[in-house]
Image: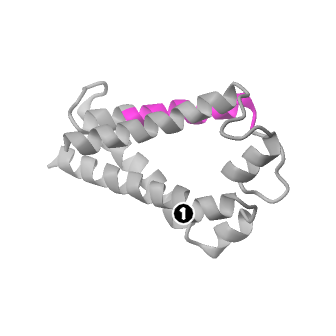
Amino acid sequence: MVLLTYITFTALLVIASLHVVWGLGILWPVKEEQALVQAIAGFRGADKMPPAGASFLVAALVLVAAMIALDLGEISSLFPHIITIVGGVAVLFVFLGRAILGCTPFWSKLTPEQPFRRLDTVFYTPLCFALGGSFSILTWSSVF
């Protein structure tokens, strides 16, 4: 369980860090805003990154999810146990919900831009399934 906890925490820490970088206005891993928007959002007609505040909010929420993972894996005890369990269930539903949404025609029509469409199929949606599964295992093992 310890390895799963650290893998989950590290993945979430990387995701949070990316959102901080984007919130600071750093266009990484590409050099043009339009290219970054097309790679990470994919919405038709989108050509601007979200406001910095939105990126920082996502980073903060993902960081909280990372801390919940540490608590579920009994690496830390930042939150009361009941908050950790409820948080774990909430996070697993968010990631599994996003993963399932990523498999629907609705999502494909809503986010048709390339390279997002390809990246979502190959990387983003499977990552959400993996994180949702990880939180399912960590939450279940923390309850029982």
Q: Main secondary structure of the magenta part?
A: helix
Assess whether residue 56 is covered by the magenta stretch: yes
Assess whether residue 5 is covered by the magenta stretch: no
How far from the left and from the top, in percent, is residue 121? 57, 65
Answer left or right for 34 relative to 127: right
Q: Residue at x 48, y 36 (%)?
A: 14
Secondary structure of residue under mark 1: helix
How far from the left and from the top, in percent, is residue 76? 25, 26
Residue placed most toward the observer, 91 or 112: 112
Q: Amino acid at mark 1?
A: Val
Looking at the rendering, which quadrant does residue 133 occupy? bottom left
Segment colored magenta: 50-66
Q: Is residue 24 above or below residue 87?
A: above
- Crowding near the residue tagged with mark 1, few <14, some 14–19, many ≥20 C-alpha atoms within 10 Å: few
Residue placed most toward the observer, 36 or 43: 36
Answer left or right for 55 relative to 60: right
Q: Tell me if I can see residue 13 in this picture.
A: yes
